[in-house]
Amino acid sequence: MPTETTVAESAEVNGLDNLELAPKSDKGTLGKRIWKSTWPKLLAVAIVLLLWQVVVWSGWKPEYVLPGPRTVFGDLKDVITTGDFWDGVRLTLIRALTGFGLAVLIGTIVGAAVSRFAPLRAAIGSLITGLQTMPSIMWFPLAILLFQISESAILFVVVIGAAPSVANGLISGIDYVPRTWLRVGQVLGMKGLAKYRHLILPASLPSFISGLKQGWAFSWRSLMAGELLVIVPGALSIGVRMQQARDLSDSSLVICYIIVVLVIGILIDVLFNTADNALRKRWGLTGN
């Protein structure tokens, strides 16, 4: 017969289990969760706009040089309603995605090869890091000499700016795969490509995604510099339109395109963060 103490302890343990396994009731509705994650961003935007307007009111620069938010956003509203604007955005995004895709392909192959072969790592491991830290703008004179004023010159700099980050992200992820997992894979008979496909690459995904995110940042910055420096005839991209606005001394339009570039960068960053959060949730690294 169970004693009263045993019954009480059992009930207490069951209660704790039920408390732990029960669905959390403090999550709130979807709308509340969206608002909770959105309002800090809106507050930051409001602060930036307020500081911007205060600087304009201070008279530090004439308004035709530094226009206020109302003027800029009014011009931005007019710009985004034109078909030419979206043609420029499409051209810039095609360049960005093409260059980034090539960088991911090259960086993944190089990273996997370097992590697998010790002599190759000794030969070019430091070179990859050196390429990663090198300013992308330094490559444009060589790119123009190699490819003239063309799309290939821009893609060359985008790829060489982003691929080292992708490669280093993969190398770092592979380096930190637990040795125990490798031994388990060996026991299960994983060898060669199967070992990389089913064990090493999935285990290195967190660092690899960080490398992809950093690689995108490098490729996006390289592309913007390229569109300002390498103006391909007939290709009216975002950078070209910004350069045209500068030539016309249209400060408001220049700021409009700066905002467009910033918004595109933020949206891409949101996509990377979504993928990263999904991966962390799958690995049980979140509080959900």
Image (cartoon, helix red, strand yellow):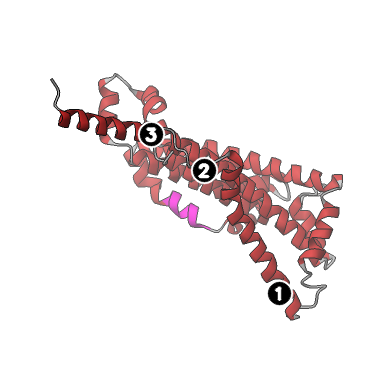
The label number, if any, that marks residue 203 in the structure image: 3
Residue 40 colored in magenta in the image:
no
Position of 203 with respect to 1 (left or right) is right
User: How far is mark 2 from mark 1, CA to CA?
Assistant: 38 Å
Mark 1 surroundings within 10 Å by alpha-carbon count, few (fewer than 14), some (14 through 19), many (20 or more): few
Q: Is residue 71 left or right of residue 135?
A: right
Residue at far bottom of view: 59
Are circles 1 and 3 on residues that touch, CB within 8 Å?
Answer: no
Question: What secondary structure is found at the residue carrying circle 3?
Answer: helix
User: Badge 2, how many Cα within 10 Å: few under 14, some, many 20+?
Assistant: many
The secondary structure that dominates the magenta segment is helix
Q: Which residues are magenta?
A: 127-134
Q: Residue at x 51, y 43 (%)?
A: 212
Which labelled disc corresponds to residue 212?
2
Q: Are marks 3 and 2 in contact (CB under 8 Å)?
A: no
The earlier-in-sequence mark between 1 and 3 is: 1
Residue shown at 79% from the left, 59% from the top:
73
Which sits earlier in the primary sequence, circle 3 or circle 2?
A: 3
Do we see residue 283 in this rendering? Answer: yes
Question: Is disc 1 placed on a helix, strand or loop?
Answer: helix
Residue 228 on image: x %, y %: 72, 57
- Amino acid type shown at disc 2: Leu
Mark 1–mark 3 Cα distance, whole angstroms, equals 50 Å
Q: Nearer the viewer, residue 180 or 266?
A: 266
Q: Label 3 sits on what residue type?
A: Ala
Question: Mark 1 = which residue?
Answer: 54
Secondary structure, mark 2, is: helix
